[in-house]
Image: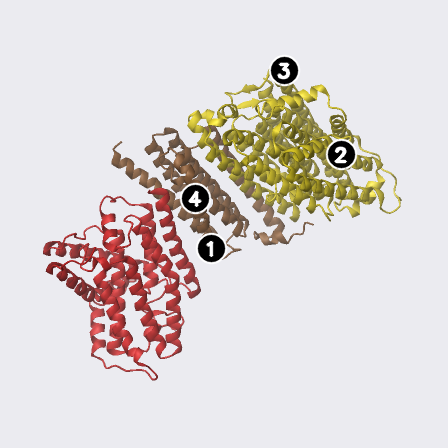
Chain colours: A yellow, B brown, C red
Amino acid sequence: MALVSLILSPLAGALVLAFWGHKKVAPALNILFSLLTFALSILLADEVYRSGPRLALDEQLFSDGLSSLFLVVTGGVAATTSFFSFRYMAIEAAHGHLSPERSRLYLALYQVFVLAMIVVLASNNLGLLWVALEGATLATVLLVGWSRTPSAIKASWKYFILCGVGIAQALFGTILLYFASEKTLGPGGTALLWTHLAMVKSQLEPTVIGLAFVFFVVGYGTKVGLVPLHNWLPDAHAEGPTPISAVLSGLLLNVALYAILRVKVLADGALHSAMPSRLLIGFGLVTLLLASISMWKRQDIKRLFAYSSIEHMGIATLAFGIGGPLATFAGLLHMTAHSLVKSAIFFVVGHIVQTSGSQKILSIREVAARTPGLSRALLAGGFAITGLPPFALFASEFLIVSEAARRAPYTVPFLLFALFVTFGIILFRILEMNGGGPPLESPVLPSPPLTFFPVWIHLGVALVMGLFFPALLASVYQKALLSLGPLYGG
Amino acid sequence: MAPHTHLLLNRLVGFLGSALLLSSFAMLSMRRMSSLVRIFALQGLLLTLGTLSVAIVAGEPHLLFSALFTFIFKVLVLPIILFRLLERLRIRGEVEVLLNVPTTMVVGLFVVVFSFALASPISELASTVSRGLIGVGLAALLLSFLMMITRKKAITQVLGFLGMENALFFSAINATYGMPMVVELGVAFDVLVGTFVFGIFFFQIRETFESFDLKHMDNTQTE
Amino acid sequence: MAITSPSPAMVAVEAVQLLFVLLFAPVLYGWIAIVRAFLSNRTPAGLFQPWRNLLRLFKKETLLPEGHSILFVLVPPAFFSVIAGASLLVPFLSVSPLLAPVADAVTLVGLFSLARMTMALGAMDVGTPFGDMGARREMMVAFLTEPATLMILFTVSLWSGSTSVPSIIRSLSDGHDLFHPSLLIAALAFILVFLGENARLPIDNPTTHLELTMIHEAMLLEYSGPLLALMEWGSMQKLLLYLLIGIDFFAPAGIPEAPTFLSVLAGSGILAGKLFLLGSGIALIESLFAKLRIFRVPEFTALAYLLSTLGFLLHFVLEV
């Protein structure tokens, strides 16, 4: 059973690294386990693709087209990040910032984090989904505060408290959902299982589900980084070690939005009204507007890209709010492409920051100039993240804008405004780092391969997804949409 | 069971719910750290008794297990951990507030009215014996939330967080006789781990800021 | 309900009520002092010490302060008679006294504030700083506790749908024998209001003349002799009446419906028992708590208001 072994792999990884994480070979083991997880996720996706949704462990675990897609993205990005992290942590150790004990904690928590996200995606039980998502926060809280500087501790405290508060709201939503479903499905284990809920969603009590949905959006939305609950996100991304910023941005936000998407399907089924869509459109618009404006005058490069993550999550939320097969497809595409591109950017940024010891854009110009490989990668990443043509984000943003024009025209001006603002700011910043700076005195540095092959893989996949959409990929996305129900499976 | 005893137990659940709500207000008004922890323990006890009564009234044996679990976890383990933390970190003295106590109380009252109104359509749909208490649970949840945003020290925020968890548990008991066991255990596990993480945090915060006042943290420049 | 031809029994009950309040109020005061003395290991004065004090004051001559107006002299009798009048409206020896149609809880609150206002006027008449300060503080406390008082009234009247005291007593004594969360919380609020309105310890110390803390005593500072006696006696009655209202609302069992000689006798026995119990409770509270600083008073009254409102709201959530 690929589904069960997919969970066992990071679990085993966490246990092994918790015991032997201080050994020399441990970072390599981390890569090994991450690769194993990735391989298993592909195996599972293949199984799901060929023979439909899988259930395991007394129906508690479950994977359909949607979750297997996200499982592959999670497995993939987690694997490439483990490569990046290998190098990143080696340099940290060389600088004397990392004792073997701390390395052990880091590696074990990394695996726990991957485990928690995989459980979120593979859980059929919406209660367990909550537990796992909270687990993902708990695993990363200490990682965000890794450097133990005052600002890092502040960031992780904020992260912990805000997400804790948010997730509590989501638990109340879960309770309400259980309350509503218990009437149709009866008390006991099955009333929170998604597969069962999806079958009876039209019989669920609309008032309760409506209220539950609001709590879910507020709760899980905190994790997605939806404004006004986004406050933790820039701090956590800027202060945490860069591999962690990469997985937070590339994976955790996705996973939380995935949870909202699942619940939205239930709410749509129960409510027969536009309330869930309107709520998501509202949150999405406010988020992308505020995030794009906040990018203005950011001096800290990681913070800049953190705001960009918020903005992209806003776009995806808006897409799901607009609804319908096309916009939902665009939202999914946007999420996956954003995962790839944003983590690639964080790999590059991480390397720059580590080499120069600063996150301020003005003081890292020189480093960027000294390593042409980095500059090129950053430029490519910048093009990709701002949604310039050959990359997949262009396709998704184009689709979202055209769908918005068709189904919710009033959102278009705001959407376009935010897109152009971010486009301008990010490109300006990146060109600033590439172009200016004092004339070169020190020698040009070679590009480190371990950092670079993940970057190019990510950008390459994003490019392929944007240039021509292979038939296989198209049918994978179609299966993902179909698994959401007839309303989305166009 | 005799209808009279049934009615009496039902009243008892209502009484415990009111006491829980009062304890949330008490948390808002307390000025000493150690009293806060004591009230938290008291909340745990109220929760245990509430769960027990619901278990007996509704004849739901699995709630007996929940009650036992609540007792061990929220009346014994967590308060002991918190007290030891207070002792080891030598946290004494007063809670610092951003909003003075009477104002907080008035805001709290509005919160209560709001949550009762929000919960009333749900309560009407409920079939449990103590359905009126869903609104009480929601109110307690929002009051704990209020405490988190109006108090400055790190440990008060933690207590607010734990108070929220209590309120959620209480709502679950009264709306649906508790969540499925596996979920309940998972939530409890998360809370336990969370408390340990909080503990680690306190030491880090003290090392770094030499104080638990979050205003030192706020003064830290991040961009 | 209109006043029908008053039966002699009903008139008699009203007379007994008035007499009871007049005579028993100082005794209750004495009782509280005894329990407090007992709790703080002091030798108590007798049960009738307040009576002895009052009689002594009545025998003294009246000294009027310089610069007083006629108001100053009129206030004590007015205060006293308003309070004594209120004792006719609070049913405690029979559920439905002669003046039942007037016996509305809101009327009672109005009478008490009238009494308070006259007292404050008297205190301000001479224009001494202490009198003014006491009056100001008294009005502040009153202004803060009144919303709570009204909320308590509304909470208890939710059962009967009317604020008339007899109907409240009836609705609470039959069929609702089990305790209710809303009533319990309202009773807690009532205790706080009681302490605030009657100048008891956490708000005011009735036995001190320490200038910075006193409220009630500051207002009486200029009075002497029989005038002072009237004021003190009135205050004692007010305390008793508050307790009686509390009994009406929260522990009405034992108040006879129809006034016969035996039932009134038994009823007053039960009542006296309850009152001694409550008096001991007050003494206990006063021994346990220290006086609040004056600027903490709003917190105390906010708590009372909070409790009463919670009780009110909980009624709708839990008991409908």
Q: At label 1, which amino acid type do we have?
A: Arg
At horizontal 52% and vertical 52% (from top left) the residue drawn is: B150
Query: Label for residue A95?
Result: none
Are the residues under marks 4 and 1 on the same chain? yes
- The chain containing the residue under callout 4 comes to B
- Viewer-side residue, B36 vs A264: A264
Q: At label 2, which amino acid type do we have?
A: Ala
Provide the residue designation for mark 2. Answer: A384
**Where, by quadrant of the figure, is residue A324 drawn?**
top right
Q: At label 4, which amino acid type do we have?
A: Ala
Distance (Cα) linking label 4 and label 1: 30 Å
Provide the residue designation for mark 1. Answer: B31
Looking at the image, is C92 positioned above or below residue C136?
Answer: above
Looking at the image, is A189 positioned above or below residue A364?
Answer: above
Provide the residue designation for mark 4. Answer: B117
Decide: marks 1, 3 in contact (CB < 8 A)? no
Q: Position of residue A282 (x, y in %)?
A: 60, 40
Provide the residue designation for mark 3. Answer: A50
Are the residues under marks 4 and 3 on the same chain? no
Residue C233 visible in rendering:
no
* Residue C147 in the figure: left or right of residue C167: right
- The chain containing the residue under callout 2 comes to A
**Where, by quadrant of the figure, is residue C221 drawn?**
bottom left
Looking at the rendered image, the disc whose residue lies closer to the viewer, 2 or 4, is 4
Mark 3: give few (<14), some (14-19) or many (20+) Cα within 10 Å: few
Distance (Cα) linking label 2 and label 4: 48 Å
